[in-house]
Image (spheres, coloured by chain):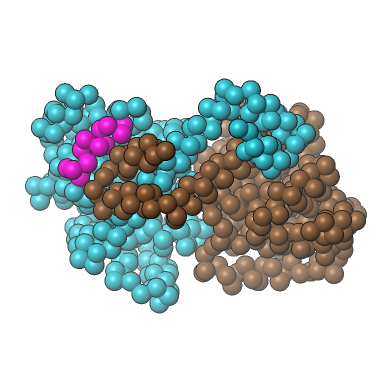
Chain colours: A cyan, B brown
Amino acid sequence: MDALLKKFLKHDRLALSRLVSVVENRSDQLAKIMDAIHDRVRNTSVLGITGPPGAGKSTLVNQLIRQIRQKKQTVGVIAIDPSSPFSGGAVLGDRIRMQDHSGDEGVFIRSLGSRGAHGGLSRATRDIVRLFDAFGMDWVIVETVGVGQTEFDIMEIASTTVVVLTPESGDTIQTMKAGLLEVADLFAVNKADREGADKIVLELKNMVHMNLSSEAEAWEVAVLQTQAANGIGVIELFQKIEAHEQSIRQSGSLKKRVHKIRGIELQEILLETLSKDLEKKFREDPRYQKIKQQVEIGELSAYAGAAKLQELP
Amino acid sequence: MDALLKKFLKHDRLALSRLVSVVENRSDQLAKIMDAIHDRVRNTSVLGITGPPGAGKSTLVNQLIRQIRQKKQTVGVIAIDPSSPFSGGAVLGDRIRMQDHSGDEGVFIRSLGSRGAHGGLSRATRDIVRLFDAFGMDWVIVETVGVGQTEFDIMEIASTTVVVLTPESGDTIQTMKAGLLEVADLFAVNKADREGADKIVLELKNMVHMNLSSEAEAWEVAVLQTQAANGIGVIELFQKIEAHEQSIRQSGSLKKRVHKIRGIELQEILLETLSKDLEKKFREDPRYQKIKQQVEIGELSAYAGAAKLQELP
């Protein structure tokens, strides 16, 4: 592990790749790795790209990578695979599309499955973002399906989040209203050559406007039209992304957010340890097993069972 | 509290109402109450109604209440209010619509806000379902916006879940695919007189069919068309709901599920206690506060901070 870390710090891509795997698998070495790279983490720009399947997220990511590379900057991409077995095909296609950049030393792409435990995927992603950051990437892009999913919270990871929608997303906007507003720093209405694009843009702008009046914010969420497949609107989108990154750095809101998330993370790590200890007790301690069984068959209420277990020496 | 519980057990509606409030507020008396009613809980039918805003869920609930009352059965309704400030108006309208039944002794309706902590709403709802159950209600209906939201998991509560969609829900179906299949025992395509209903029905049936082949299940998810506002299709829907309830009782899958959830609940209660203890330490113990601060400003990594705190005596 020490040799691997040394190579990583010397900018070895293979070492990065192997460390990402170690972190993804939540190995026992995790704390050691994160600790070793800690001083190198600079809180680089983390761009979250989210939206429904079929919105064209991967195509847009592909175009954004191109923008970044044209500026001679580097980028690490984390593509979160949804747990659904149905979307397997589409995701695979997306990944292949991203291989446009596979020969490029300034681009590092990694897919991440959501097979992990509740909240585990967020933690793993956050740690991999840090690996990319410490490796010296100028940008990290995290692409994920959906908004407000149980399994993954993009807000805890990205410094700028773009919600990608299409002219057909009216229903999603209705369902997700508050959720969308909470996560989006920018809206991209993609496939904007299709019918209904103007209507969706207007709907989003109204939503943003209503929200603005209630909370005075330095940044006004922008709504842009893109046609990622043809590269239309991508330059404007990237300019807005850069503007948002600058805004949160100047206002100090990024720093505040980073501090807050670190504090939450500390509590999460401690709670995870307690949770694992508890699971171990249910696995190994016959007293725990007996009371759990009594609760399961209804002999004891869950509260009564918990009280009994808390009284144990 | 003892007097209140006594009245509750004697079928006093006012006592029920007050106990629901106590449980909703997660008071210290919670364990005592749930323990006192434990023997009266019969695992009655719990019907979950979920779907996007504007799908007509409340109108459908209203119609289902009518069906239940025509059979001289009783029903408790829990309407989960989404946390969004935007949907306030709509929700209020919905509640007023439900007041159709406000003079009816066999119907008890309660709204529940989602202001609580992560997962807290699920726990509170589960406990209120038990109150209704112990009170003797034949049915409990839980109405909630959205599917797969972070804040509320209908699957942990309902024995039969109906996902209500409309002909305009194509985008939601694409986004939620696996999530929808996971929760739905029945699909109701409401407002089925609108254009596109047949297409959505076909799409859902195909989805259900693809899923069936991978998992052999006793129950085949049905896709029904309804027009709740005109009462069309409601009798058929209620028949399917009854059929599902019978199916999970006969197959033993309800019992298995109830046992499993009780076991999970026991662990949740214990973990919640540990989590509260931890929060208390961060609030009161200066050693915890100092290390949290060091982590926040980046002096220590979160893992290093956690390790230090775990070493404390």
- Judged from this view, the residue extending furthest toward the front is B313
The magenta segment is A30-41
Residue A76, image x and y in percent? 22, 41
Give the camera-side residue of B223 and A2: A2
| Magenta-drawn stretch contains A181 | no
Residue B36, image x and y in percent? 80, 48
> Which SS type dominates the magenta stretch?
helix
Q: Is residue A47 visible?
A: no
Q: Quadrant of residue A269?
A: top left
Point out the image quarter for the N terminus of chain A.
Answer: top left
In the shown orientation, is residue A247 left or right of residue B221?
Answer: left
Residue B284, image x and y in percent? 45, 55
Question: What residue is shown at x 52% (from left), y 39% (from top)?
Answer: B178
Residue A290, image x and y in percent? 68, 26
Say if A75 sits above or below A19 in the image. below
Point out the image quarter for the C terminus of chain A.
Answer: top right
Question: What residue is shown at x 16% (from left), y 31% (from top)?
Answer: A8
Give the camera-side residue of B27 and B77: B27
Question: What residue is shown at x 67% (from left), y 45% (from top)?
Answer: B157
For the image, the number of numbered tags is 0
In the shown orientation, is residue B273 left or right of residue B10?
Answer: left
- Judged from this view, the residue extending furthest toward the bottom is A213
In the shown orientation, is residue A21 left or right of residue A282?
Answer: left
Q: Quadrant of residue B42?
A: top right
Say if A275 sits above or below B110 in the image. above
Give the camera-side residue of B218 and B10: B10
Question: What residue is shown at x 61% (from left), y 62% (from top)?
Answer: B113
Q: Is residue A234 visible?
A: yes
